[in-house]
Amino acid sequence: MTTTPAAGPGHEPGTFREDWLEGLADAYARTVRRVPDTFGVVGRHAPRPGKVAVVIGGGSGHYPAFAGLVGPGLADAAAVGDVFASPSAEQVYRTARAADGGAGVLFSYGNYAGDVMHFGLAARRLAAEGTDVRTVLVTDDVASGPPPVAGQEVDPSRDRRGVAGDFFVFKVAGAAAERGDDLAAVARAAEHANAMTRTFGAAFAGCTLPGAGEPLFTVDAGTTELGMGIHGEPGLRTTRHLTAAELADALVDNLLQELPEPPAGNDGRVAVLLNGLGRTKYEEMFVVYRQVNRRLRAAGLRPHRPEVGEFVTSFDMAGVSLSVMLLDDELAALYDAPCDTPAFRSLPGEHTEAADLRPSVPAPAAAPSAPGTDLPATAALQAALDLIAAHEDELGRLDAVAGDGDHGIGIVRGLRAAVRAARTAEPGPAADPRSAGAALLAAGLALADASGGASGALYGTLLAETGAVLTRADGFSTALFADAADAAQRAVSELGGARVGDKTMLDALDPFRAELHARAGEPLPGAWKAAAQSATRAAAATADLTPSRGRAARMGPLGHGHPDPGATSLALLLTATADHLDR
């Protein structure tokens, strides 16, 4: 998971809350507006006479919570405090007044001492003025307190905090108010949602507040903090850095043992939210959710409208949390109801059941042949894979000089697919050029598909063009492979638009091709070895070249002094093949 520090614009700490709220109101003026002289926003739809006003809130630093969840079908207004601090009672009061449509106000927020006191004081003032007020605290964080004990009511002022489960509770409350429920019914629905919701989170790195030079809190490098709170509150335990699958298992394991008794009418349905804490990328979260989905289904649960994204963050904190809400028909209907806010929209009539209807995609077949029994093309590709995999990190470092650093990973991934495809496509026991050509044609397409990117396309073309020449030949010879290298060079040059000297793989391929032609009458093993040595020297010499093609060309002299990763990996492939032929 991502743990590198996030860079962002500078902020003025003293005006940060004012500045970001004003920016939000400007950007989403169609949905929300500022409450005058108040650090709060109210929906354009509010107040609505006769409708219960759902008012939420909490500190800055957690967007989309809380101001991003204001709009029809969700919250009517949100009061916002300073970074990681409760809004004051005065701010809460003014925000509630702006949203009140005369049917009462429901306050809902996470169970933190400052929020409890300030929202509580505002509620007392509103009640003294004749406004009916109810409060529903969100207490979903299983890591922040002991579980409920049968027959003993948990005191929410001393126990669990509210984290990403806020979203479920706010959504249910907002939908109940939108359909016209009275204040007591809206509060009951929100309380039921909270009782059915559990969250567990994990962090890999802390966060830095606006204007601060140092992180507010840290997580030791190479570790994962299980159960850490969204303000850096200590977790349950520290463990080594977890893979995506291990992280998913930890999240699910900690939630399954905490799930409440299912409500009447529950058939395994659960609302699921995998929440990013601010720095974790969406693609990474989807990798985690893949395993979360498998684990939940294996436990007999049915994910219903799962959400993966940022809902309750902690600035640039690296981590995720998993929230689950057990559903009955009533909760499911409220959760599915439409809404429109800056950060979350739900359209009427959307498909709601996350049925596991994906087509079955078989895993890549295991290699059928035993070590040492591969036919020529497959054996040569396997030798290339082994050598390039041993240099994967080096290739990545070379690519990172002027690229994105993924060349080693991509080529290794592509060669694995190429080996599998060649084993399937290389027929017979007979070793002849046509058989090897068919294998290389299939391998080229498989490599390009699996590797992706420009390097994958060029490598795939190289293999496929070589294979195409071999399929038209009757016997192996050095001259045959010299002709194949000619065809491969022409195709790679046409596809990529590069020429020799542009600091690409062509700078290794061209001397290889020329050496093979010079030794066309010699036995293949010796000629190939000499040609591979020429390619290796040429690849090293690309350090003296300046890139002229592709993304690296825009880096200018920054690419000088380092060998080209494509030329280097090609030289490794040719060297591995030479070693294989020499056996």
Image: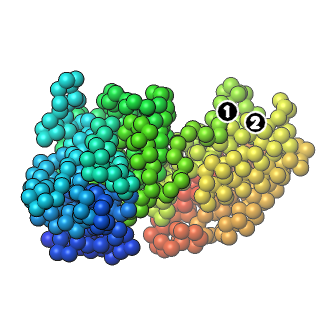
Asked whether, in this view, residue 399 is left or right of residue 77, the answer is: right
Asked whether, in this view, residue 469 is left or right of residue 304, the answer is: right
> Residue 135 location, x and y as percent?
20, 49
> Residue 50 location, x and y as percent?
30, 61
* Residue nearest the viewer, comparing 28 with 279: 28
Say which element carries label 2: helix
Q: Residue at x 73, y 31 (%)?
A: 374
Q: Residue at x 8, y 58 (%)?
A: 128
> Residue 289 location, x and y as percent?
45, 42
* Residue nearest the viewer, comparing 342 with 491: 342
Judge whether 571 appears above or below 559 on screen: above
Label 2: few (<14), some (14–19) or many (≥20) C-alpha neighbours in 10 Å = some
Q: Quadrant of the C terminus?
A: top right
Q: Mark 1 or mark 2, which is nearer the start of the sequence?
A: 1
Q: Residue at x 33, y 36 (%)?
A: 196
Kindly tell me whether residue 36 is visible in this rendering: yes
Kindly tell me whether residue 289 is visible in this rendering: no
Label 1: few (<14), some (14–19) or many (≥20) C-alpha neighbours in 10 Å = few
- The quadrant where residue 103 appears: bottom left
Q: Residue at x 36, y 36 (%)?
A: 251
Tell me the residue that label 2 is attached to.
Answer: 424
Q: How many marks?
A: 2
**Which amino acid, by three-letter code, is at mark 2?**
Thr
> Residue 471 location, x and y as percent?
86, 47
Judge whether 9 appears above or below 579 on screen: below
Tell me the residue that label 1 is attached to.
Answer: 365
Say which element carries label 1: loop
**Which amino acid, by three-letter code, is at mark 1?**
Ala
Asked whether, in this view, residue 84 is left or right of residue 541, the answer is: left
Q: Are marks 2 and 1 in contact (CB under 8 Å)?
A: yes
Extreme right residue here?
A: 474
Judge whether 76 appears above or below 432 on screen: below
